[in-house]
Image (spheres, helix red, strand yellow):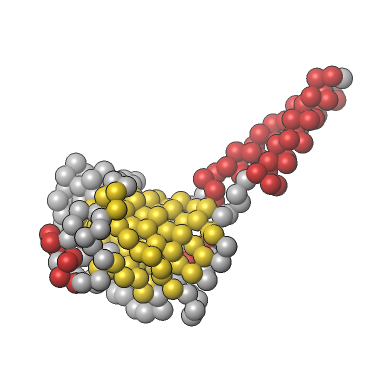
């Protein structure tokens, strides 16, 4: 009886975590895995970077991180990073770039919503972050940057994850990325993420295990 009571308490605790401890859909991570580099691509499933979205009140915070030596560039499409924005009164605020976590102060960025940015093979996207001075980003002239950070106001994560390709990045492939090393082109994230990094599913699985344990003890 004592063991059954302890098991029941454990299940209640897990269910409590599910309702108040898990962040729900307030933070999502998307992997950038789709390659559109015309001169060659690495093996399928290669992760070029991640897009982390955090809902903060009425705004969404973007943290875009390229991995494995990949760098952001502008190769003629007019943006470093593009996405779909569906709300007329939204805006991109505070965009800046970093290199391995250190802010790059020599590069000014601008963010625009409710516009139209075209890229080969994609439908037009309505929002983008790009270099404020185009000549700063003409191919090799851009400073080395691998992270972008900014906020989109008056939006939800659901409103920002629409269309066939949620997020597009213009990149220079890292020297160690087999199949595209030193080449430039577009990559995108077009696969839905697991909300909150899978925490809710993990907690739910634990609760179900606890419930099954109680059921077995009662039957015994």
Q: Residue at x 64, y 39 (%)?
A: 203
Residue farthest to the left?
140
Q: Residue at x 29, y 53 (%)?
A: 103
Front-most of 99 and 22?
99
Query: Would you say residue 59 is visible in this rendering?
Result: yes
Front-most of 71 and 165?
71
Q: Residue 43 location, x and y as percent?
A: 27, 45
| Quadrant that contains the C terminus | top right
Q: Residue at x 18, y 57 (%)?
A: 143
Q: Is residue 37 above or below residue 127?
A: above
Q: Quadrant of residue 206?
A: top right
Q: Quadrant of residue 120?
A: bottom left
Q: Quadrant of residue 177?
A: top left
Q: Is 7 positioned to the left or the right of 169 in the image? A: right
Q: Is 167 positioned to the left or the right of 11 in the image? A: left
Q: Residue 210 location, x and y as percent?
A: 72, 30
Q: How many marks?
A: 0
Q: Is 75 positioned to the left or the right of 67 in the image? A: left
| Quadrant that contains the N terminus | top right
Query: Would you say residue 44 is visible in this rendering?
Result: no
Q: Is residue 124 above or below residue 7?
A: below
Residue farthest to the front?
105
Q: Residue 15 location, x and y as percent?
A: 72, 40
Q: Residue at x 44, y 53 (%)?
A: 52
């Amino acid at each position: 009886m004592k063991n059954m009571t302890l098991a029941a308490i454990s299940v209640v605790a897990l269910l409590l975590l599910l309702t108040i401890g898990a962040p729900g859909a307030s933070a999502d991570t998307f992997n950038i895995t789709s390659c559109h580099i015309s001169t060659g691509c690495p093996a399928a499933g290669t992760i070029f970077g991640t897009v982390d979205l955090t809902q903060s009140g009425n705004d969404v915070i973007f943290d875009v991180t390229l991995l494995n030596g990949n760098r952001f560039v502008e190769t003629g499409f007019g943006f470093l990073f593009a996405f779909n924005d569906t709300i007329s009164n939204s805006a991109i605020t505070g965009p800046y770039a970093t290199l391995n976590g250190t802010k790059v102060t020599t590069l000014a960025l601008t963010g625009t919503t409710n516009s139209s940015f075209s890229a080969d093979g994609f439908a037009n996207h309505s929002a983008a972050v790009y270099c404020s001075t185009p000549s700063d980003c003409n191919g090799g002239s851009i400073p080395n940057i691998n992270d972008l950070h900014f906020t989109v106001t008056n939006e939800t994560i659901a409103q920002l994850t629409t269309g066939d390709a949620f997020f597009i990045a213009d990149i220079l492939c890292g020297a160690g990325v087999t199949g595209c090393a030193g080449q430039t082109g577009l990559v995108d994230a077009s696969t839905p993420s697991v909300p909150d990094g899978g925490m809710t599913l993990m907690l739910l699985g634990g609760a179900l295990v606890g419930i099954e344990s109680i059921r077995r003890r009662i039957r015994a």
